[in-house]
Image: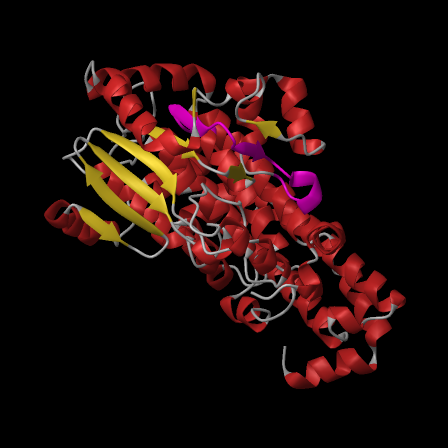
């Protein structure tokens, strides 16, 4: 629409909303026709919303109108995608011939299907906006990705795409194989005998994860797995800068809640993380020519050991559930403070009950139960407890024990466990639910209220 049309909407707002609501399309089944009519409807809804004041300045009536516009438009996106998701995904991937990572896929969808998901320009316009003041346009990305992941063929293709090594990883792998060390900022790799140590590093924020760490963390995981001079990998945290823990190693404090509150963590971050490096911990790195299913053992993978020093909070506790062995300092603890954050803790809802049983898992996720590593409940996740000062020796001992019968046996056994515990389609279906629900959580007023109440987020500096 032109600027004149936008002015007309502003001058006749009530009439514009009424006409828009009456023009809500119905699925015809014809892809080309539905594509045109639904796209026009979605774009018109955005133009009406843009006439309103910014979200933080709306009165109650304006807030209700915006809410209804979003609700109806999102409902229509669900209807369109339920009928046409395979055709949509096929176009975005050249008839399934190209692997498109999730962060590129949402951009391609915005270009090819205007109004289906927010454009790069719309996302950029809110880049410096507090999370609570954002319009919530990225919820449409969650709706779209949920439909992709929920569709058998498209979802498996996207999961496959995200298990491939990143384009940048090959160059970094060559450097690591040459030097035996690699520093990519968010992580440092060191080869120690037959093992590779991945040391997560964001020391200013207690090794928290955020938008500044996610890409390079995945590169480091790729390199660790693909390194052919090592046969087992160790995950550990670096020493941090915070005065309370100065100089102490910590595995990590989960998502950077300050950045979350400040709107610096986009919704796609959550999906990229779970489909990317966290899934690679569990299933390894795929190749383009063969789907990485466990039955045929087509992924390249390593057994992983995690070391918990200090604590493993939130996302770092989630990572433990993908590990083959966990060594913990006797004074360390684990928490999944999802209730205080107002979000879903990754794939923990699927994986944690396998370790602790359903009741403890629900208590940890929904009632913020702390699990001390050196406790009966903590030992359901942690395999070995060591005094804090003996962690180096304990890690070396575990590495030696797990590889004493050869790396081939370790890989074979992890695959055999995984095929019964978490087949790839079970993971894909979980991620379909996660994509939609996490999108709504990410823009919920409850998220902001929780961060202000429990984290004092409004007074913290990024």
Q: Position of residue 78 (x, y in %)?
A: 64, 46
Q: Does the rendering let one see residue 258? A: yes
**Residue interval drawn in magenta:** 321-344
Is 185 situated left or right of 152 in this image? Answer: left
Q: Nearer the viewer, residue 86 or 428?
A: 428
When asked about the image quadrant of residue 356, the answer is top right
Is 435 situated left or right of 289 in this image? Answer: right
Q: Position of residue 346 (x, y in %)?
A: 55, 38
Does the magenta segment cover residue 331?
yes
Q: Position of residue 281 (x, y in %)?
A: 37, 34
Q: Residue at x 68, y 72 (%)?
A: 47
Q: Position of residue 429 (x, y in %)?
A: 53, 31
Is 389 situated left or right of 150 in this image? Answer: left
Relative vertical location of residue 233 with respect to residue 35 in this rendering, above or below: above
Most extreme residue toward the left, as rendered?
178
Q: Nearer the viewer, residue 131 or 82?
A: 131
- Mark count: 0
Relative vertical location of residue 7 with respect to residue 112 in this rendering, above or below: below
Q: Residue at x 15, y 35 (%)?
A: 228
Does the magenta segment cover residue 34?
no
Q: Nearer the viewer, residue 408 or 371?
A: 371
Q: Does the rendering let one see residue 26? A: no
Q: Nearer the viewer, residue 47 or 175?
A: 175
Q: Residue at x 70, y 44 (%)?
A: 340
């Amino acid at each position: 629409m032109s600027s004149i049309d936008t002015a007309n909407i502003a001058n006749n707002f009530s009439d514009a909303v009424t006409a828009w609501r009456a023009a809500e399309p119905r699925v015809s089944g014809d892809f080309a026709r539905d594509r045109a009519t639904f796209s026009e409807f979605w774009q018109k809804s955005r133009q009406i919303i843009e006439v309103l004041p910014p979200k933080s300045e709306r009165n109650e009536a304006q807030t209700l109108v915006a809410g209804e516009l979003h609700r109806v438009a999102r409902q229509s996106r669900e209807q369109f995608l339920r009928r046409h998701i395979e055709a949509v995904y096929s176009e975005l991937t050249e008839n399934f011939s190209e692997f498109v990572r999730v962060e590129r896929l949402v951009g391609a969808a915005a270009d090819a299907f205007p109004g289906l998901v927010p454009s790069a320009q719309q996302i950029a316009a809110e880049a410096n906006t507090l999370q609570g003041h954002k319009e919530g346009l990225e919820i449409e990305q969650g709706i779209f990705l949920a439909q992709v992941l929920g569709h058998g063929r498209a979802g498996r293709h996207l999961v496959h795409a995200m298990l491939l090594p990143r384009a940048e990883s090959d160059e970094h792998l060559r450097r690591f194989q040459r030097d035996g060390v690699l520093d990519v900022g968010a992580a440092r790799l060191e080869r120690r005998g037959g093992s590779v140590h991945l040391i997560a590093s964001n020391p200013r924020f207690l090794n928290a994860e955020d938008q500044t760490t996610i890409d390079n963390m995945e590169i480091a995981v790729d390199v660790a797995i693909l390194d052919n001079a090592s046969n087992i990998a160790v995950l550990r945290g670096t020493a941090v800068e915070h005065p309370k823990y100065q100089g102490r190693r910590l595995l990590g404090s989960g998502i950077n809640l300050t950045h979350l509150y400040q709107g610096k963590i986009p919704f796609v971050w959550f999906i990229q993380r779970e489909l990317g490096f966290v899934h690679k911990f569990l299933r390894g790195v795929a190749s383009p020519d063969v789907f990485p299913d466990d039955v045929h053992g087509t992924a390249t993978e390593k057994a992983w050991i995690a070391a918990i020093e200090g604590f493993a909070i939130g996302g770092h506790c989630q990572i433990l559930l993908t590990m083959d062995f966990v060594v913990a300092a006797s004074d360390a603890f684990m928490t999944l403070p999802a209730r205080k954050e107002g979000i879903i803790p990754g794939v923990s809802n699927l994986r944690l009950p396998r370790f602790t049983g359903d009741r403890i898992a629900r208590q940890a996720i929904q009632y913020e139960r702390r699990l001390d590593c050196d406790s009966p409940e903590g030992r359901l996740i942690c395999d070995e407890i060591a005094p804090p000062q003996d962690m180096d020796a304990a890690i070396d001992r575990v590495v030696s024990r797990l590889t004493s019968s050869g790396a081939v046996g370790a890989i074979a056994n992890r695959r055999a466990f995984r095929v019964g515990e978490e087949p790839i389609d079970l993971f894909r279906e979980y991620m379909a639910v996660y994509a939609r629900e996490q999108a709504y959580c990410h823009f919920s007023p409850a998220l902001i209220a929780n961060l202000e109440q429990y984290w004092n987020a409004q007074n913290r500096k990024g």
